[in-house]
Image (tube, helix red, strand yellow):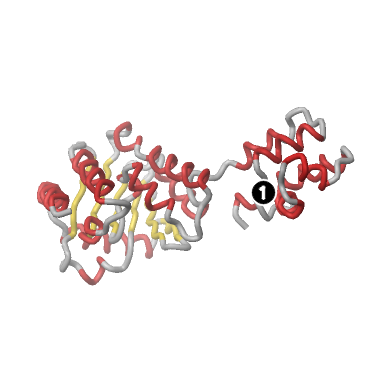
């Protein structure tokens, strides 16, 4: 069960406990909040996210003195999917970071508009609050690129990443401009792997590698519904070898910047 679902159940149960303790019928709470009875029941049972409106009305009817409304803090959506949080925690203190992406601009390099277009188009759909939290969390990660100048960042993008239009042409134009700005950072390397190179490993999926301050090495692979974090070992070594092969076949940083400019002109 996800962290969000647990929070919904906890907050819903608190509403129910306060309501029954104060002798407030569910029907009375539903009428005062302007919700249907089944809708309130679903929120109390954790099947739906309790709304701020319900928290406020329940707090007032039950004379809770702000204790029910305080549950709002537990209902804020996570800034990142639960499956990626362990890797992102390691990323914060990494001394070296490398990635290969065959389909999309890596999260660390995305503009807000590009990230919003991707996240808002998730399936199943996310609520607006979760979309905004996820976008803000993704953009916040980017402070590491400019604030941690002693950390080496390396990115390899398959040509399909540049050819796939996410959002609109304007979104892509802005994204290309941002890539070229990132390219100018001295601790940043961005390379493009053109079509027709390194087929054997280029189509196997995204790879992310990092090294911690304790010189521990990790490899991370992520799919639509799952992700795996590998500690230093045979699998991590194999993925690092694949990444090295991909990078060897990629264009140089200078050639890559010119390639990005060319694709941008063709939009």
- The spot of residue 139 in percent (x, y) is 38, 40
- Residue that numbered label 1 is attached to: 8
The residue drawn where x is 34% and y is 53% is 209
Residue 199 lies, with reference to residue 244, above or below; the image says below
Q: Mark 1: which secondary structure?
A: helix
* Left or right: where 90 falls relative to 1: left
* Left or right: where 259 falls relative to 18: left
The residue drawn where x is 53% and y is 49% is 127
Q: Residue 73's image quarter? A: top right
The residue drawn where x is 77% and y is 28% is 65
Between 246 and 254, the one lying in front of the other is: 254
Q: Residue 160's image quarter? A: bottom left
Total numbered circles:
1
Quarter the N terminus occupies: bottom right
* Left or right: where 51 falls relative to 102: right
Q: Residue furthest bottom?
A: 200
Between 241 and 203, the one lying in front of the other is: 203
- The spot of residue 258 in percent (x, y) is 10, 49
Q: Residue furthest top?
A: 65
Between 240 and 188, the one lying in front of the other is: 188
Query: Badge 1 local density, few (<14 within 10 Å), some, or many (20+)?
Result: many
- The spot of residue 267 in percent (x, y) is 18, 53
- The spot of residue 198 in percent (x, y) is 19, 67
């Amino acid at each position: 069960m996800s962290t969000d679902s647990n929070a919904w159940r906890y907050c819903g149960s608190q509403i129910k406990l306060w309501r029954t303790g104060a002798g407030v019928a569910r029907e009375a709470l539903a009428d005062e909040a302007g919700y249907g009875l089944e809708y309130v029941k679903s929120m109390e049972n954790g099947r739906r996210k309790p709304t701020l409106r319900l928290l406020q009305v329940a707090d007032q009817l039950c004379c809770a003195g702000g204790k029910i409304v305080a549950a709002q803090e537990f209902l804020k959506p996570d800034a990142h999917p639960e499956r990626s949080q362990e890797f992102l925690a390691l990323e914060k203190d990494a001394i070296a970071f490398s990635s290969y992406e065959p389909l999309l601009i890596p999260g660390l390099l995305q503009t807000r508009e590009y990230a919003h277009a991707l996240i808002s188009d998730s399936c199943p759909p996310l609520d607006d609050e979760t979309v905004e939290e996820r976008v803000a969390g993704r953009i916040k990660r980017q402070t590491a690129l400019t604030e941690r100048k002693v950390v080496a960042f390396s990115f390899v993008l398959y040509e399909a990443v540049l050819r796939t239009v996410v959002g609109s042409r304007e979104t892509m134009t802005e994204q290309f401009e941002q890539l070229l700005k990132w390219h100018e950072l001295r601790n940043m390397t961005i390379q493009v792997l053109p079509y027709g190179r390194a087929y054997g490993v280029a189509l196997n999926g995204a790879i992310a590698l990092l090294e911690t301050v304790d010189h521990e090495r990790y490899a991370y692979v992520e799919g639509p519904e799952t992700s795996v974090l590998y500690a230093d070992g045979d699998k991590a070594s194999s993925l690092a070898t694949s990444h090295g092969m991909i990078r060897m076949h990629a264009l140089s940083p200078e050639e890559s910047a010119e390639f990005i400019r060319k694709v941008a002109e063709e939009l």
